[in-house]
Amino acid sequence: MEAERTLRQDELTDLGEVAAQLRVDAIRCSTRAGSGHPTSSLSAADLLAVLISRHLRYNWSDPRDRANDHLIFSKGHASPLLYAVFKAVGAISDQELVDTYRQYGSRLQGHPTPVLPWVDVATGSLGQGLPVGVGIALAGRYLDRLPFHVWALCGDSEMAEGSIWEALDKAGHYGLHNLTAIVDVNRFGQRGPTELEWDLDTYRRRVEAFGCQALVVDGHDLAEIDEALGRARQATGPTVVLARTLKGKGVPEVENKPGWHGKPLKPELAERAVADLGGVRRIRVTTPRPEPAPPAAAPESRPPTLPRYDKGAKVATRNAYGDALRALGSRPEVVALDGEVSDSTRADRFGEAYPERFFELFISEQQLVAAAVGLQVRGYRPFAATFAAFLSRAYDFIRMAAISRADIALAGSHAGVEVGADGPSQMGLEDLAALRAVSGSTVVYPSDAVSCAALVAQLVDRRGVTYLRTTRGGYPVLYDNDESFPIGGSKVLREGDDIALIGAGVTVHNCLAAADELAREGINARVVDLYSVKPVDADGLRDAVRACGGRLLVVEDHYPEGGLGSAVLESLADLAEPVRVTHLAVRGLPTSGTPTQLMAQAGIGVGDIVSAARAAEPPRR
Amino acid sequence: MEAERTLRQDELTDLGEVAAQLRVDAIRCSTRAGSGHPTSSLSAADLLAVLISRHLRYNWSDPRDRANDHLIFSKGHASPLLYAVFKAVGAISDQELVDTYRQYGSRLQGHPTPVLPWVDVATGSLGQGLPVGVGIALAGRYLDRLPFHVWALCGDSEMAEGSIWEALDKAGHYGLHNLTAIVDVNRFGQRGPTELEWDLDTYRRRVEAFGCQALVVDGHDLAEIDEALGRARQATGPTVVLARTLKGKGVPEVENKPGWHGKPLKPELAERAVADLGGVRRIRVTTPRPEPAPPAAAPESRPPTLPRYDKGAKVATRNAYGDALRALGSRPEVVALDGEVSDSTRADRFGEAYPERFFELFISEQQLVAAAVGLQVRGYRPFAATFAAFLSRAYDFIRMAAISRADIALAGSHAGVEVGADGPSQMGLEDLAALRAVSGSTVVYPSDAVSCAALVAQLVDRRGVTYLRTTRGGYPVLYDNDESFPIGGSKVLREGDDIALIGAGVTVHNCLAAADELAREGINARVVDLYSVKPVDADGLRDAVRACGGRLLVVEDHYPEGGLGSAVLESLADLAEPVRVTHLAVRGLPTSGTPTQLMAQAGIGVGDIVSAARAAEPPRR
């Protein structure tokens, strides 16, 4: 790209000074910490100097200003550069930067997290910042309708992640003119050259084929950078600035040399480098201020009128999800996303009622979750749905969402062997384990339509990553419409003192049928609907232990590890009273068949519960 | 593409008959089953008719023939078509096809799995078959050096998955001329039009930018298809055949109409369609036979000489992984893969010794695992490594590997808060839960270099998905080099009868230090190294219960759900004797700091163990 040299020489000199300060500070903080990625910061210092001085519109004194641009370091390991930026704009002090980077108790962690008010999301797992940026840009273009711009700094190594291409594809599809990815092509990964090194032309062709404008620049030519960023902001579609850079730029001993990834400069080298770069500076960069945003439109928010169901009617919980989500649409902050299966997850019921707040992500589950994370950055309450099995595709994104302290609701349909003829590839059988293990998560798994709707209504105000597991088939409505289902609670559906049958979702129905059969044999089984898998109702479980002399039977449509059984056992681990738990779960690899056949094959059917309850012995005392 | 019309009219007629049979049979079996995806099969019937009649080289009587091509239905939902192919070539009977498809107990499941000897891997989670094909093609080109070809039938919807672009990128990078993807562009997904519909030109530009030859054809023109498949086999790089097709082709009532995804034709419609297509046929297709493969070279296989370590020396288990893997290189079937972090995982130690058996997948963890699955299809024993945290990126692939009954070893380094200053994005803290929940998996987590090397040596012969968790930092070698560490076992490092301290990996060292401190207070703690997390040593744990009066303390560098604590609790759930378990795990979101600081912050440090052991009460009897 041929740059129009519009910057005056004094402006270029000033920008060079800013870039030098960023380099110096990135070196200083990482050398002091004894770890970090200075060379990955040095390559992008010129890009950031121009961005923050002339293009990023940001009100640093109010990071919650709705008009602010968004700056995401998708290459989160370049945190020394990001924090040097924060010093340059006056958001943090030089002392905080140099003395606390990567130290215990500091908010300047090894990779950025939203502990810092200017950081939208945690990064550090590559290929995630840009996809989240797509979600923020979706909000800007389609919901907020504000002129803020999303700038994502990417590394060249992360261009090998498929999620980057999911992101650019969706950016193109949705015409996100308010999104710019700046790729720091320094051609070195962690352990050697990247796959494409400096083959900028291949990057360009890929980017263009995925529907984005590509601007190739010398990432150390301040005027070229300025021209490109200006064009990016004015573009009619998404832009990718492909910047050819040198890793370690500005420090001859490490510049453009392999073997320097993730290594701080030794103190004497750092000292020399800082001196060669002109020493420590205290330049205060004045970032352009955003135009004040018009006052947020406050569309009417009405309390949702939840769907009501007839007791005994057979209704799939996935249907109740769709119904309840549509009802929640009365709150304008609620948005829904789906991965091209909304007619199965029933998210389409929301989409039909609120097309302007429904986002189709097609079959790209990583981008599905990333978009949800981005939307909640802008204050929306996203519900993202696909098959429970396919949320596993986005597990790294869910993990990172938790580190981002993102408030997102995930809905996984088609749980367990209950799926039937489609076979194991379509069955969510690890999802409870995986989602329970996410930091701060909430996991609910309703057995009927009434409880499902009640739980969906609570997820909208729940913090953190929440997960709703729904069932494919229709099962009888068990509860009155006015029943309440607090998260962290459980329901005793039948009283009994011989053994407690504990299920969730579809197995609650099996437990009820088994209790009927056991009653005919004179065995009084208590039936517990453990709809709240995390947090689990420890008090309710202890009541069951006491009521039933320590005899529990847990049955779940999930593999044996980490699911409902583990939730029960973990909550009772430190209980003084003796407990003995029989655990029925899916122990082999399922096949195709009817739900009833497959539940029997897995040993979680009605007959299995009856047999196991008969055989269960009390704990020894 | 302009086809050279080399096929004679009678050949075209015959191919048309084969295609009609495939259509008829796909309709019949799905209608009989009452579920399945006939329209997604009809669109690709012409492609498959030409492929199996003229290009696929396959010895159906010996699916293990090393010379066979590989046929993968990446769009696994088109199983009616795949099974119709199996009938056409005589691999299964018409009766099995029509009477058993999707029935309980049948090997013709809703989506293909390797229960069928002609199926290499399970598909049904979109975007996975092609990446696995990349692994098979890597084996063919670089290891087997045989002229077999890998044919992957893809749907157009799955082109939205980032994993497809990871696969094409690697196919181009590794010059996989022996790989052809055939994309059935029928422009309808599950719930409506695909993102790109029939924009074949955009597909073409994407494919070419990712380093593959693109051939655009009319997917219902038999001569064009034939020409393209012939060119694909002769190509010098990977090929993607982009076939414009009609969903439901051949049945006017459903052809090219939305709303027919995943819906069988009603019996009367099916009957009419079959009649219109010329009725049921019994054509037996003679697939071209592969050239006999030369006898497999039998490179010398020597028993590995495992590394030895000095007791007390501080050695990181990730180093022992690299050392042991290099030692295992003496067995020629062992191959290693890494996701651009081999200098951290230490997989580079294998790569340096055996560069021809080391595959760099760059930062694409989905493709990393898929390539491992593909390599094991060809009989290799792959070890795939990255950070434990980043294996979460490939969780859907790991899940599907289990359904494929694939034998792969995964190594995740940088487990837990022990990672230190890099912060939570780099810490594997959900991995034990996630990997334990995989069907048939093995999970090991050694505390020292000796046990790590011994476990790596066992994984090479272990069936299923195996997972080794390693630690970043160096800790003292605890064991003599001749000690054995059977999978499913545990080690009592210190005898004691007041309480059992149970750890794995880094927490074993904390338990030992805590036991020292407790001993000074007169508390005799037993210390158990539970290096085998799945299967877990139930007998050893019961011994600990009995020895310590039911007082156990489990401490793990992992979130509290689904990990080591759950493994212990699950194994003791049905124990008659009372047990009381104190469980120390990482309960909050970690930050940056030193390993010692972060373990203390998480409550899993030495002091935490001492305090908790002091406070632990016995179960009530």
Image (tube, coloured by chain):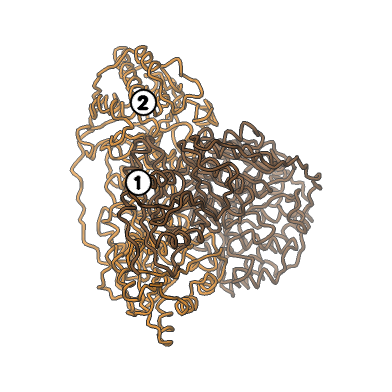
Chain colours: A brown, B orange
Image: A409 above or below B564? above
Q: Mark 1 highlights which residue?
A: A520
Callout 2 touching callout 1 (CB < 8 Å): no
Residue B303 lies, in percent from the top left, at 21, 62
Q: Nearer the viewer, residue B451 or A224?
A: B451
Chain of the residue where label 2 is placed in the rendered structure: B
Give neighbour class at mark 2: few <14, some 14-19, many 20+ (Cα, 10 Å): many
Can residue A267 be seen by looking at this rendering?
yes
Image: B280 above or below A314? above
Q: Nearer the viewer, residue B18 or A614?
A: A614
Task: Place residue B504 in its image quadrant.
Answer: bottom left
Left or right of B402: which side holds A334?
right
Residue drawn at the location 44% of the way across and 76% of the way down:
B617
The type of residue carrying mark 1 is: Arg
Q: Nearer the viewer, residue B590 or A304?
A: A304
Q: Mark 2 highlights which residue?
A: B30
Quadrant where the C terminus of chain A is found in the figure: bottom left
Quadrant where the N terminus of chain A is found in the figure: top right
Q: CA distance from mark 2 to mark 1?
A: 41 Å
Say what secondary structure mark 1 lies in.
helix
Left or right of B394: which side holds A240?
right
Residue A504 lies, in percent from the top left, at 46, 48
Chain of the residue where label 1 is placed in the rendered structure: A
